[in-house]
Image: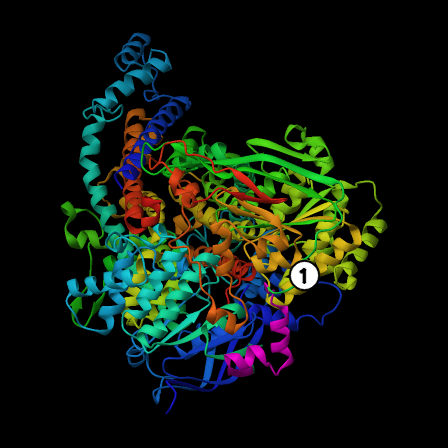
Amino acid sequence: MSAIGNSRKAETLERAFAGRSLWADARARLFKNRAAVASMIVLAIITLMALFAPYLSRYAYDAIDYDLVSCAPSWWPGDAACSAGGTHWFGTDAVGRDLFVRVLYGARVSLAVGVVATLVSLVIGVLYGATAGYLGGRVDAVMMRAVDILYSLPFIFFVIILMVMFDRNFILLFVAIGAVVWLTMARIVRGQTLSAKQKEYIEAARAAGVSPFAIITRHIIPNVVGPVVVYVTLTVPDVILTESFLSFLGLGIQEPLTSWGVLISDGANTMESAPWLLVFPALFMAVTLFCFNFIGDGLRDALDPKDY
Amino acid sequence: MGALLEIRDLDVRFSTQDGEVHAVKRVSLDIHEGTCLGVVGESGSGKSQLFLAAMGLLAANGKVSGSVRYRGQELLGLPAQQLNQFRGSKITMIFQDPLTSLTPHMNVGAQIVEALTQHRKMPRDEAQTRAREMLDYVRIPESGRRMRQYPHELSGGMRQRVMIAMATITGPDLVIADEPTTALDVTVQAQILEILRALKTDKKTALALISHDMGVIAGNADEVQVMRHGEVVERGPVDAIFYAPQQDYTKMLLAAMPRLSDPVRLATEPREILLDVKDVVVTFPVKGDGFFAKTRPLRAVDGVSFTLRAGETLGVVGESGCGKSTLARAVLQLIPPDAGQVVWLGRDLTQAQQREIRGARKDFQIVFQDPLASLDPRMPIGVSIAEPLKTLEPGLSRSTVRARVATMMAQVGLDPAWINRYPHELSGGQNQRVGIARAMIVRPKMVICDEAVSALDVSIQAQIVDLLKSLQAETGLALIFISHDLAVVRQISHRVMVLYLGRVVESADAGTLYDDPRHPYTRALLSAIPTPDPEVERARARTLLTGDLPSPLDSRAQLTFLKSKRIDDPDAVQYRPKLLEVSPGHLVAEFD
Amino acid sequence: MLGYALKRFLGALPTLFIIVTVAFFMMRAAPGGPFDSARKLPPEIEHNIEVAYNLDKPLIVQYGIYLERLVKGDLGPSYKNKDFTVAQLIGIGLPVSVKLGLSAMTLAVFFGVMLGVWAALRQNHWQDYSVMAIAMVGITIPTFVTAPLLALVFGVYGIHIFGMDFTLPVGGWNGGALPNMMLPVTVLALPQIAIIARLTRGSMIEVMRSNYIRTARAKGLAAGTVVWRHALRAALLPLVSYLGPAVAGILTGSLIVEQIFGVPGIGRYFIQAALNRDYTLVLGVVICYAALIIALNFVADILYGLLDPRVRLR
């Protein structure tokens, strides 16, 4: 305990009856972080837009219109080959579909992949890591060696092989990406479990006769949750990027469904002639990724504050 | 004549996430040439921050104002380049934790040489030779070999000697020692203090000795300054402070320090035997160095026996590596012993099933050393206290549990209204009371206190010891009090057992042990304890153990005090010194 | 040190073995084979082909044959590019990919560390914020956006300032000439620079707060000495641990970069081979990459041991 901290303890003696838990402390710190709060708001807006996509635009996401092929939005500077009129806010793509609604539908898919794949990795990673950490010894050494081995694989290659083998199955996409990402989660959970296990209050609980199961649920898990939550928010952007990578290679979502990855890779191809096709999806994806990163950093600082 | 170092109105503030902390409040002091200023205070007194600020070593969020003059030269506010002409050459500093205070990837010799060559141009070989000489001066054997070793390869005592070598090689006028011995064992502490004293007498170096231990200050300081909450409470020559303190706080500090002159607890009426430990052995496999090394057994506890009666306190004393904490855990069956018996109320627990042991847990509990680490930070203290009760007496209703927790909190001196507070909102002493409440709530017959007061400030220590004594008087419980601090042990124990490298070297009533110690190790321990009495300290002849504590892996180490029977082969089976009864109840291991 | 190195080396071999095995069985488990084509071949010809390529034997036997040949350095013939063996194909493409990847890695480490240390030493000042902002951008924008973007800016449109022409060739490798390398290497390095900068900054900040840095300052050492001799070595440790994943990241990125900039490396072979079910080529490429990564992990381990005496001396 630092000397600084102790003199503060004396000052906190006169205080209300209900204690101020570490979670409450962390929450207060998080909300003081302006970048994190702004990110949460922006992310909420994007999520809502994605959820209510069908109601926000009069166009269906797969409505083809060969009259308005690759047309810039009316407010786009410079002269493009054609202008899409006032109702296509983001312009149209190569077969005349409205870009705005496609970006929103892309949001649905990208966010869904991000969240679901992360959850998959969370479940696998937590189970694997907590088991290795709690059992310790030989079992832990073997399990972690396996993780080390997997870590050194160019995992993406196996995902590609998988996607090729099973023909771009939608569910498989989630599982495959989640399977790539769980390794670091397992490492973090295992590290946290190990250090939690060695804490004295675990020994105190054993001395009090608490059963191993109760120790795990009551003492270890609540103390491990913090860093795991931080890592989860930092995994989602990773997953979205991986999905966009696969889409670029042509191994991701199938037509007519779309994701930001597909939109961006299509847009990258027509960068010179129709830059808006790249700009808008890229912008949305970048902003979303930034938001997750800021929130993750904010959570990390809130849960483990360093004074200077 | 002006002072060597003059500090005027030094003020230090830190801006933290939770507000501003005023660590040092306009403190002034003088240090004269060749004298030692002892700065004493408990945690939060600002004594370390004061000197860190003077040396320009504050953390980034610290603000300092005031004046710090070295021989008339103002140091505060100097740009780093100019400050470095004094810092590290004329004024040097040594820190509390030598392991983290030495750069891990540079060998020890390089770090000492660096201290020298930074301030004085000289060819490398000369610098190396000077560094070696310095290592010899601080009494590190085999200095040539040690120069090339890394900090983690040295023991704690040796690392601190290296720090002293680094701090004195440039011939400074002032050495600031920030809690230099707090992290060290008692016998090693005595050796380090001896070196610091020699600096003063041999080299006429002034010393600023910062410590929370009044005994250390009494034996080394010429002037003393007492600090509290960032302010100076009292200042004066050492005899004045210790023999005629003016301020209440100073008086309280002096009174709280356990002394070897205090009355000893008399033996109680012998009651029933609760615990009978016979020849317990606990070993750990340790991997050897190198690629094909075998694992060797580390005999942490090597055949210890004792009995404990109801209402009695057994003090267990020893330095690091003596096995006292391992012994405690073996008795509680948290670590299964490899040999021997632990008989509780007639039942041998080493042979019992898990279920039986869990049932017996109601009878014995443990209080740990670090109050904050032994409480789950995410649980309110009421829940932590209630946990053993809910586990070991599952049939109780919620309101009964709550009532008992509240009663227990009051009994240990905590306001029951704090039942929903969290550990990080409480002080160290208060958290330790929570730990005691948690141990006592199931009304155990025996409580093991494993260094339970070692991490606390002196004034709090005294309170906790009193609490334990009153709980013992009220409930008739038996205590095993483990500590490295013989003075504290004396306050609370009826009988005392001294451990060395896993074996008992002496065991007797408290009175007998302190008045008539026989074994050389016990005598070394006793003579190494600093007492808060300057005259006694000055006059004392010391029975110093030389060198560091030997490694428990070395089987020859056990015969340090019986060298006549020692075989010099590391793999041979050594002779076991027998325990002899020199008078009723007084056991001493054989020695030369 | 030698014992440590030996242990690490022996640990690497089983890894390679497992990868080869998994890849082998995965490829065979996929539906479809290398010789499925639109037209159905007469059964005898199909049978002959199968025998010639050992496809009629049980899977385990095929595995055994493959391993046997592998040890001798024979990676088998490419099923699709019938005039070449896999080893030949890899021999053409591997040096190119290695040159590309190594240059990108060097660039990434150099700039990443410089930026990270700079930001750490100026923590919470504008230098720190700007580096972190750029790093964030570098991490979130995918390679397949920066590649065409930079190609557009530097290649198609070109930069003409101060009377100098900064146009860079966009397609073609030209045997690895410097102007041709600049764009692909930069694009490949960018995300890694960002990650390494963040990593180094965080680690440096941690280290600068430690007790031994306080001691170094107390010894009166100049600020530069404190940073370079005492802090940096410890701060680089997490970076060394990251080297493995960094290389994996660069290999992944090279798939895109090679495609967009027309670099004749083995990344380009890989996807085609996967889509065409050219078993041997896919396997060959995977083994190649895996061996590279494992070798680099080994180097990273050794480096770690050199930097941190506590690990090798215990």
Relative to B169, A147 lies left or right: right
Q: Is residue B443 above or below residue A290?
A: above
Q: Can see residue A113?
A: no
x and y, in percent, of residue B532 in the image? 55, 70
Relative to B202, A240 lies left or right: right
> Which amino acid, mark 1?
Ile
x and y, in percent, of residue B142 in the image? 27, 53
- Color scheme of the displayed model: rainbow
Question: Is C58 in front, or is B67?
Answer: B67
x and y, in percent, of residue B306 in the image? 62, 40
Residue at the spot 79% in from the left edge and 51% down from the top edge: B475
Residue at the spot 32% in from the left edge and 25% down from the top edge: C279
Q: Which range of residues does the magenta coloring cover?
A: B234-260
x and y, in percent, of residue B134 in the image? 27, 64
User: Tag 1: Cα neighbours inside 10 Å, few (<14), some, or many (≥20)?
Assistant: many
Badge 1: chain ID: B
Q: Residue furthest bottom?
A: B1
Residue at the spot 52% in from the left edge and 75% down from the top edge: B46
Q: Is residue A196 above or below residue A138?
A: below
Quadrant including the N terminus of chain A: bottom right
Q: Is residue B312 magenta?
A: no
Q: Is residue B259 magenta?
A: yes
Q: Residue beneath label 1, please?
A: B464
Relative to B218, B86 lies left or right: left
Q: Residue furthest front?
A: B583
Q: Quadrant of residue C112?
A: bottom left
Q: How many marks?
A: 1
Q: Quadrant of residue B90?
A: bottom left
Residue at the spot 36% in from the left edge and 27% down from the top edge: C18
Question: Is B390 in front, or is C239?
Answer: B390
